[in-house]
Amino acid sequence: MPLHVPPAPAPALRTVLTALASPTAVHEARTPSLLRAQGPLAPELPLPVHVLDESAPAGTPATRLAGWRFLIRCGERSVAAAETRLTPDGYAFSHFFEGPYIASTELALRQAEALQQPYQPRLLSVPRLYMLTLWLHGDCAADGTTGHPAATDLLVPLAPAPPGIAAHRPHRAEELLPRLSHRATPAPLLGTPA
C-alpha cells in the first residue's frame, strides 16, 4: 500500500531550501557526502519528528513534535538529511547530517510500502535509549504534527537499534512502547528507597 506522507509545513521546507542554497550552511556541515554531491540537491520525504515524552504516566504514550526531517537527494540517492526544529517563532533550520539512519530510514520506508494497510509515516525518537523508530500511524488523514501512538500503530526501530531490539522488525506500539518505557526508566541509586 502506498504511504501517505504528510506535507511539511511551508516554513519548515523554506528553511531547508534556504540552507541548501547557502554556501556557508552546506560547507560548515560535517557531511562529506553533501559536500561531494554533484548536481542539484533536493529535500524529499518530509517526516515529522516526534519525541517520546518519558514523563507521561505509565501506559499513556505521549509525544511532542520536535521538528521535521527531510532526506536530501542528489540524483537517484539520498546523500544526507536536514532537520528543522520547532521554536516559539515557528520552524528553524537545525542541521545537516549523514550516517546510518538515512539508509535505515529508506529501507524501513520501502518495507512499509509493502504492507497491506496504508499508513502515515512519522519518526519517533526515544532519547534515553538513543533510539529512532519509523512510526507508522494507522490514521492516514490525521494531522502529522499531533497525536500519540495508537495501540495498533507500528513502530519500526531504525538501525542502529539498542541492544536487544531488532532493527527493521515492525512492532505494534502496544507491545514495544512498554518495553521501551521500562528500559528508559533509570534504575534507583544504591541505598535509596524504591
Image (cartoon, helix red, strand yellow):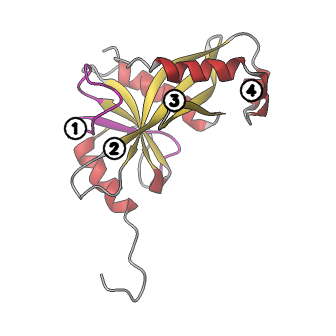
Can residue 139 be found in the magenta stretch?
yes
Is residue 169 visible from the viewing direction of this image? no
Q: Amino acid at mark 2?
A: Thr
Q: Identify the image quadrant of the C terminus.
A: bottom left
> In what element is the residue under mark 3?
strand
- On the image, which quarter does residue 101 sit in? top right
Task: Give me the disc on residue 69.
Answer: 3
Per the rendered image, the range of residues in magenta is 137-161
Q: Are marks 1 and 2 in contact (CB under 8 Å)?
A: no
Can residue 169 be found in the magenta stretch?
no
Q: Is residue 52 left or right of residue 45?
A: left
Identify the main secondary structure in magenta.
loop
Q: Is residue 108 left or right of residue 140?
A: right
> In what element is the residue under mark 1?
loop
Seen in the picture, residue 83 relative to 23 is either above or below; the reply is below
Read off the residue under disc 1. 150
Query: What is the crowding at mark 4: few (fewer than 14 residues within 10 Å), some, or many (at least 20)?
Result: some
Q: Amino acid at mark 4?
A: Val
Of the pair 54 and 190, the residue shown nearer to us:
54
Task: Give me the disc on residue 64.
Answer: none
Is residue 35 visible from the viewing direction of this image? yes
Q: CA distance from mark 4 to mark 3?
A: 16 Å
Determine the residue positioned at 74% across, 10% down. Answer: 39
Indicate which disc, 1 or 2, sits on the residue closer to the N terminus: 2
Read off the residue under disc 4. 26
Q: Are marks 4 and 3 in contact (CB under 8 Å)?
A: no
Indicate which disc, 1 or 3, sits on the residue closer to the N terminus: 3
Q: CA distance from mark 1 to mark 2?
A: 11 Å
Query: What is the crowding at mark 1: few (fewer than 14 residues within 10 Å), some, or many (at least 20)?
Result: some
Task: Give me the disc on residue 63.
Answer: 2
